[in-house]
Image: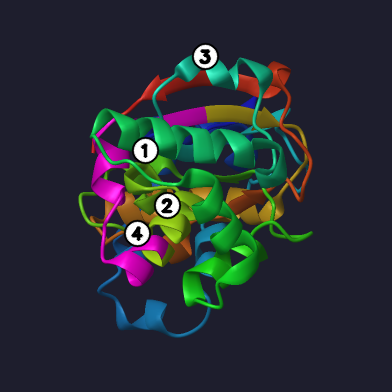
Amino acid sequence: MILDCSTLETTLASLEPLLGMRADQIRDRLMAPELNPANESLLKGDITIKLLEAFPGRTDDWPYTCIAWFHLTRTCDLKRFREGLKPLPHVIDQIWADLRAACDKEGIVLEWQELRDWVETESTGHYAKLYRLKQEPGMQGPFGMLLLESATHESPGDNHYLRCPETIEDICKEFKARTGIDLIDAYQKNTKPVVVKFLDQAPCAECSEAAIYYAYGSLWNQEYGSGWNVYFDGDGNSVPASMIASVDYIGI
């Protein structure tokens, strides 16, 4: 069984082995009057604990074989994920190549090696520092998120990776601070947002709690916040191709 929070419906189905109920029963329990978010009693204490207490028949064992995670990014070629998801230092050359290809298509001619040397070694600017920080141990990824909900929002939140991956953004903003020229538009015109769904076998109690809260909040039409989500960190280790379940372009 996979804990899959692609949608509210997949989440409810995934919660069946954890909570010991059918999806429709879980829905009804979460929609019980005593769990109405308007109740003042719910404001006292930890709502997650109260949600767990609503399911006395839940198992204490980890019932899942895998957790589905979602990596959000942009690309011009889905085939590159055939080799899996790699940490930042392994794909940094490709990132620069993608930005250059996008700018070339828009007629933006730059001294790319000079720009890269400046961002990587010379600039003392804020975004150059962020660029370098992301390549240090503990910051290299690859990253993913449990709840795909964030990818469907119009306003930037967790889905800002779909609008512009952070390292590309760091390069472009540092370059704009130096020259006034914005390269992000060229990059966005020549790439598309994509979601890479991958599976990981490591148990995560925080994920099951987040799935319950996500189902609860969605059913009660609560405003989604990034605090609902749980995040995957590869910590510098690649996600192999065998773990990737799907790769799809997505509209935002």
Between the C-alphas of marks 2 and 1, the distance is: 8 Å
Q: Which residue is at a point 46% across and 40% down the rendered structure image? A: 72
Say whether residue 182 is magenta.
Answer: yes
Which residue matches tag 3?
79
Which residue matches tag 1?
8
Image quadrant holding the N terminus, namely: top right
Q: Do the residues labelled 1 and 3 touch (CB within 8 Å)?
A: no
Residue 78 in the image, given as x and y percentages of width and height: 46, 18
Q: Which amino acid is tagged 3?
A: Lys
Whichever of labels 4 and 1 marks the residue nearer the N terminus, that label is 1
Q: Do the residues labelled 2 and 1 touch (CB within 8 Å)?
A: yes
Q: Which amino acid is tagged 4?
A: Gly
Q: Which amino acid is tagged 2?
A: Tyr
Between the C-alphas of marks 2 and 4, the distance is: 16 Å
Which residue matches tag 2?
214
Whichever of labels 2 and 4 marks the residue nearer the N terminus, that label is 4
SS under mark 3? helix
Q: What stretch is highlighted in magenta?
A: 175-196
Which residue matches tag 4?
157
Residue 232 in the image, given as x and y percentages of width and height: 64, 48
Dot 3 crowding, Cα within 10 Å, few <14, some 14–19, many 20+: few
Q: Which of these two is toward me, 78 or 6?
A: 78
Q: Are marks 4 and 3 in contact (CB under 8 Å)?
A: no
Between the C-alphas of marks 3 and 2, the distance is: 32 Å
Q: Which of these two is toward me, 247 or 12?
A: 247
Whichever of labels 4 and 3 marks the residue nearer the N terminus, that label is 3
SS under mark 1? helix
SS under mark 4? loop
| 206 shown above or below 86 | below
